[in-house]
Amino acid sequence: MSRIAPGARFLDPKVLARVADLELVARTVVEGFINGLHRSPYLGLSLDFAEHRAYMPGDDIRRIDWRLFARTDRFYVKEFEADSNADFLVLVDASRSMGFGTGEVTKLDYARVLAASLAYFAHKQRDRVGLVTFDGGVVAFVPPSAKHLDAVLHTLDRMRPGGPGALHEPLSRVAEATRRRGIVVLVSDLYEEPQQVLEAVRSLGHKGSDLIVFHVLDPAEVHFPFQEPGGYEDLETGERIPVVPEQVRDEYRRLMAEHVAALRATLGAQRIDYTLVETSTPLDQALFAYLSRRERTVRRR
Amino acid sequence: MGLTFLVPAFLAGLAALAIPVAIHLVYRQRHVSVAFPSLMFLRKVPFRSMRRQRLRDRALFALRCLGLALLALAFARPFLEGASRLAAPAGGGRELVVLLDRSYSMTYAGRWDRAVQAARAAIEGLGPDDLATLVAFDEGAQALTEPSADAGRLRAALESVRPGAGATRYGPALKLAQERLDSSERPRREALLITDFQKLGWDGQDEVRLPEGAVLRWADLSASDAANVAVADLLLQRELEGGRERVSVSARLTNKGGRPAGAVGVSLEVDGRVLQNEKVELPANGSATVAFAAFPLPPDTSRGTVRVDADALPADDAFHFTLSPGQDVPVLLLDAPRGARSLYLSRALAIGNRPRFRLKTVRAGQAGAPEIEAASAVVLNDVPPPTGAAARALKRKVEAGAGLVVVLGERSTAASWGGEAAAWLPTPIGATVDRAVERGASLAYLDRAHPLFEPFRGPRTGDFSSARFLRYRSLPATDGVLARFDDGSPALVETKLGGGRILVWTSTLDVTWNDLALQPVFLPFVHQLVKHASGHAEGRPWRTVGEALDLSRFGEGASSAGAGAARTEGFLAVSPSGRKAAVPPGSLELEEAGFYELRRPGRGGEGAWSVAVNANRAESDLSVLDPEELAGAVTVAGAGAAAAAAGAPTTEEREQRQALWRYVLMGVFVILVVETAAAHRLSGGTAARPRR
């Protein structure tokens, strides 16, 4: 297990939030992350296995799958996604609820940096990066391209909380617009029923794309630490209900935990990577934990 | 020892305890609004207790309620009743003289109850080193206790005091306080005056000064709107009608108040029977006279009362009097044989009925012992004294209390007054003094302080100086000279013979030697001369509370005769309240208003005398004296000696000494600090602040 590089402490989201240049932020995150990967036994930047092909003279003998040789007595090499220059599309939920935050970083800020980091990461691997921001509909769309990193970062930088959010409509549009399979990353706070989330996300994988879901939440949304009784107003619908926190706290936490578990189970059953990320968690730590877990998953296939 | 409050109205602030309750129980949604990303899960939580919120942080709530309650208590100025130890200020003990007014104006509109409360509060406020004296006063002052720290003894003395029928005088009470405070060794000296500050009680003439440093406090029980209707005075007029004496009674009523009194009922009672009723209108601060119709005088002494409708001051609503049949004064006039010399004298004595002189004129030498025995006064009108049995009878009569008037004239010589009768005169009769050449002498000196000349004390009550005396007898007396001529010669001399009096007039009572008989003053002078000689004192129909009734000359206004008769035995006096007391010969102090009855011991009610007594009507005037004026007159300016005004001084002072409100406020401060710290600690988690 690679350890987190010493410089990764700098990648505190609160600290990152104060850095104006998103590219710098993304590069910082990624390089810090990459530094952490330097001792990884896995060479290459991409750990996503794509397929086997027969060994051709000149191939890197470190790519020979020796297990398959043991079974087939033939030499096959592994071919990774990175080698195939896939489309890397990041879908960022920019609905009004994403503007919520109890610390210095809102969910949208966190999603912004996360998306930028992933885009930068993919661009380093010579993937074609694209971006979609949405709320109830598609707000901004940057088609995947090897030359669109700047556009992606620029769009992310200008991203602001929009109107009420919904997953189905914008994700369906994206699914229709996507011609090639690739990697689709969804960053959202997923305030819909798990089944609805699945319906919306699954449409993105109809062409065999690899789906990754980052469920971004503020710690207050997970732990509900509020004390003051008051009228709680839904940021997206404007609905208000009176809440006495100490009376609802336990129940809320249980419901939230059930929701997360349901999402994990529902999406996982469809082989969609699901990761819950709290905005208080340093970004590189979240990325490393995810990618390490993903790498183990890939190896077990 | 109980907790009480100086300003209990502030306890209404306890209603503010509802404020923290409202804060804790009432959910004010409009003041707290939390923006939350999604109510997706909150909607699913059952809101079972949104209709009512329970109290959070009970300890905090209790602290806030306690703080508010203590604040209300502090403003109400609590103090401990009977906490003498707490109330005792530093600096040694206190000498306190409580002056309690018990005049009858203190029965007006609950003043007495308030006075007792003030006195009781003063007693309860005594410190462990204090000494107090309770003094009750009206016209005089009486110390009911010695200086004592025993609150029980003082309270017992207080319980024994009742308002009386006396009037108000502050001088004696303040004098007594001065004496007590002067003799005190305690560092602090106070006098507490509990009174209704009647103006009549202080004329500024009493020389009273409290010791330097002594404080005069007071409890002012007066009222600016006091009103009082009183029967102020009576006029009894007698007249003879058909040989029978009739009496008419006129009553003067006063209204001491700012509002007119309409249809005031007035009644006349005699021996308990209402004879007449009248109605009268009284103007504000005015008076009116009610004249009752004349009625026959009862044969024996009767008790009468004029009564008005009862008001807030009942002591002056009734005016008592006694009525006795007229008492004639039997006078024996010994005249010269020709008799014409007594014309003016006899005519003067025939006029008038107060008293009525029953005159019998006898030629000198023809008066016998029986006539002399029947007379209260014998007039020797320029005649020699009787001799023999008549002389002895006369001497005996005078010694027994009758009177002798000796008129000196031409026939009154030393020779004619020889023998035993010479001893009756103060000095031997001298020669005739002839002042005709000087156009007559005049009376230059009268002893107006003598009872004989009492009616002539005022201005325009009788001019003796206009009478011219051509001749008079020389009577070189030095003692008992009641009048002198302008050359200093005695004109009238009084001497005693046993229990009786002898009056010697050195000129005539006709027009031979002087023209006094032609002066208007002659008639009243002759009346006074004979009346005084006889010892007759007009019966007083009523007396005033505070007077001392002279029992040795009792007969004044009595039902039976015996004017001037000395009493050697005592009486059983029954007061108007029914209290009986054996009274030795001497005097009886009249302390109550109503009818006293004087009985001879062993005779029950037979031959008893009635004496009507009324309260001093000056006390009916409830006009108020400025307390500051009184205090300024009796206190000495000096450090700590300023007279202290107080509505309820004892209570206020006690509260100021204890100053419990300060401790209560300190407690409020401590509670506020604790509450602030507790609230800050319990406020805990942060509220959501969405980033926009």
Image (cartoon, rainbow, N blue to C red):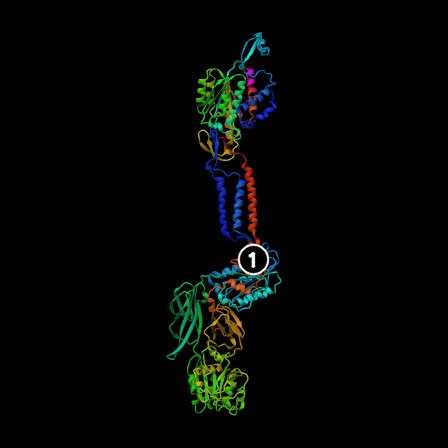
Tell me if I can see residue B641 in this picture.
Answer: yes
Q: Horizontal and vertical percent for residue A119?
A: 52, 20
Q: Quadrant of residue B229?
A: bottom left
Q: Chain of mark 1?
A: B
Task: Report how many numbered discs are placed on residues in the image.
Answer: 1
Of all residues shown, which one is farthest toward the bottom? B415
Q: Which residues are magenta?
A: A292-300
**Pick the front one: B604 or B360:** B360
Which element carries disc 1, helix, strand or loop? helix
Residue B519, quarter of the rendered image = bottom left
- Seen at 54% across and 56% down, the residue is B651
B486 vs A250, nearest the viewer = B486
Magenta region includes residue B9: no
Above or below residue B246? Residue A263 is: above
Q: Provide residue B609's location: percent of width, then percent of height.
A: 47, 74
Magenta stretch: helix, strand or loop mostly: helix
Is B667 rendered above or below residue B688? below
**Does the magenta segment cover residue A293?**
yes
Of residues B456 and A94, the one drawn nearer to the viewer in this rendering: A94
Q: Is residue B113 left or right of residue B246?
A: right
Callout 1 crowding tier (Cα within 10 Å): few <14, some 14–19, many ≥20? many
**Residue B256: x and y, percent?**
43, 65
Residue wearing tag 1: B124
Res B402 visible = no
- Measuring from the top left, give residue A237's x and y in whole percent: 44, 29
Circle 1: residue type? Glu
Question: Compared with residue B49, is residue B632 higher up or lower down, i.e. above or below?
Answer: below
Q: Residue at x 38, y 80 (%)?
A: B243
